[in-house]
Image (tube, rainbow, N blue to C red):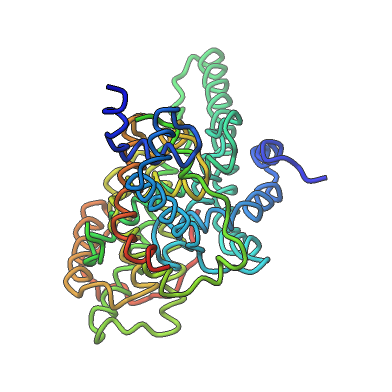
Amino acid sequence: MFEEQDQIHLTEGQALQILTGNAGDREKKHLATCETCQAEVESYRRTLDHVSRWAPPVRNACYGQSVWRQIAPAVRLRARCQRRRRWMLGAGLAASIAVFAVALYTSHEQRLTVPVSRQSVAANPAASERLLDIAVQDHVRRATSLLTRIEDQPEHAVEGFERDAISNLVAENRLYRQTAEQENDRKTAQLLSDLETALVVLKHDPARLPVSDVRELRKKLIVVGHSNGFGFSNISDFSDTQPKKIPL
Amino acid sequence: MEASDPALVARALSGEEDAFRVLTERHSLAVFHLAYRMTANEQDAEDVVQETFLRAFRNLKRYESRSLFSTWLYRIAANYSLDLLRSRKHFADHTAVQGEVDWLDAVACSGPSADQITYSHQIRESIEKAMEQLSDQERAAFVLRHYHQLSIEEICQTLGVGENAAKHSIFRAVRKLRRILEPITERV
């Protein structure tokens, strides 16, 4: 009976197990006498050796520094936003307390109702959302304008200066998308996600992006931008494609 | 003496920009390697690297030092690579055609040597074509295991799948690769 079992060939899992030296005695014994299974194990060994030779393109020793140079502006901007947000929250809280204290004091002394909003602008989440809206509005306008120009060009020919503009838009887009995701603004996040995909393709290989997709995305930007209150409906309104200072 | 990753993370969290710079410079190359093997496209890999570190910076508070910082970065990079591959399929027709655990150890390898780096262009192409024929999950699981030596548990966390699914993904990947590459490896 044992001899009969020895005649059964190794499964693929067992063959891979042999490679690690973790196979059981029975499998080893079988392998020692079975040429078919020896060939099977050898074939797996060759495959893994072969794919191990797949080396990515070489990068120089300063690669890490170049990556940092590329992301540093975005990191600094985010760090500033985080500090500002903390500061605004703190300032808003302090302002609210101050307003409340004044109101309390006044009502106590003069028994008058003070018509002061206890909500400071800084503490109001709507204020920070508005800041994001303004920044995104500006960004979407520039992206739409760029897509319009590219759409009109044969095979999406991208000029040198446009390449820089696209790179800036990609970096900005990432920030806004991440912020929108963080704020749970799914509609804006989705729009920016679609835009980012198109921008990345445009940046590296414009010819890969079909004209129909550019047109569709541009229309979507206008429609969604309009419904988000970005306040534009005609692409001719925003011819400025140069990056502006972001009001954040 | 170089500061450890957890120490640098703590400093970065306290607002020290330079600490995050060191982390970026230290891990960029490994993340690039992972990203390239996931996307098989140099430019896409560069984008993945940048996005990975931006996401890492944004979510630094969520990093738990019980896992390696590099593993945490791999998780971000692998997930973003998968997102990128999926979104690419929307915009362009990608050329992709669509026992026991011990054997998994065989799938982990050490880095390429100098002679391996100079391996012929044709051979590299053959591997890239073979990798394209793996599903996203098979490819991710195999790359994480074979080239970056992540444990099965780490792969499960990275891909959000169960242990069996991760093991089977690697197993299927190895089986497919062997089938596709067999004519070449036999010749070599």
For the image, the number of numbered tags is: 0
**Where's the N terminus of chain B, which quadrant?**
top right
Q: Position of residue B143 (x, y in %)?
A: 43, 50
Residue in front for this viewpoint, B9 or B177: B177
Up-down: is A201 above or below B104? below
In this rendering, would A42 be left or right of A103? left
Q: Residue at x 50, y 61 (%)?
A: A53
Q: Position of residue A22 (x, y in %)?
A: 48, 32
Q: Position of residue B149 (x, y in %)?
A: 52, 43
Residue in front for this viewpoint, A4 or B10: A4
Residue in front for this viewpoint, B150 or B112: B112
One can see residue A130 in this view: no
One can see residue A120 in this view: yes
**Where's the C terminus of chain B, which quadrant?**
bottom left
Tell me which corner region of the image, top left, top right, bottom left or bottom right, holds residue A60. Answer: bottom right
Q: Position of residue B130 (x, y in %)?
A: 32, 61
Q: Residue at x 47, y 76 (%)?
A: A164
In this rendering, would B12 be left or right of A107? right
In this rendering, would A103 be left or right of B183? right
Q: Residue furthest right?
A: B1
